[in-house]
Amino acid sequence: MHYIDFFIRLGLYPLTCLIFMNLFPVHRSRSTKVCFLIFSSLLLTLIEWGMHGVSIIKYDGWKLQYSFFKYLFIFLLVYINGFVSSKLSKGNSME
């Protein structure tokens, strides 16, 4: 097992999602939101490419080309989760 790879995945990806949610342009247009999703996915793919290039992370059957779509999917799920959570918390307020 690649321990450095494990700890990077354990720390980097959750922190990235937290940063993503805090920087997400909530009150902007849909096109700005889509551009932000694409940019975030490209940025993380570039970081992963760099870490793979210096052998910090290793692939076992994985291709870097998959990573962009993986990050796009993950960020989309994080956005949907935040959106639904926000709507539910507003609907359940005790005012």
Image: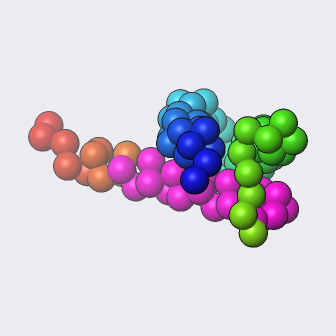
Q: Which residues are magenta?
A: 62-85
Where is residue 30 shown, x and y percent of the image? 69, 50
Where is residue 90 shown, x and y percent of the image? 29, 45
Query: Would you say residue 50 is visible in this rendering?
Result: no
Query: Would you say residue 22 is visible in this rendering?
Result: yes
Magenta span has 84? yes
- Main SS of the magenta part reads helix
* Along the viewing direction, whichever of 7 and 29 lies nearer the viewer: 7
* Along the viewing direction, whichever of 11 and 27 lies nearer the viewer: 11
The C terminus sits in image quarter: top left
Relative horizontal placement of residue 9, taking residue 81 as reference (left or right): right
Kindly indicate the quadrant of the structure image that contains residue 76: bottom right
Which color mode does the image show? rainbow
Residue at 75% x, 69% y: name it: 61
Kindly indicate the quadrant of the structure image that contains residue 44: top right
Magenta span has 69? yes
Seen from this angle, which residue lies furthest left? 94
* Along the viewing direction, whichever of 43 and 47 lies nearer the viewer: 47
Relative horizontal placement of residue 5, taking residue 48 as reference (left or right): left
Residue at 81% x, 64% y: name it: 63
Residue at 73% x, 38% y: name it: 56
* Along the viewing direction, whichever of 7 and 93 lies nearer the viewer: 7
Where is residue 35 shown, x and y percent of the image? 78, 46
Seen from this angle, which residue lies furthest front? 1
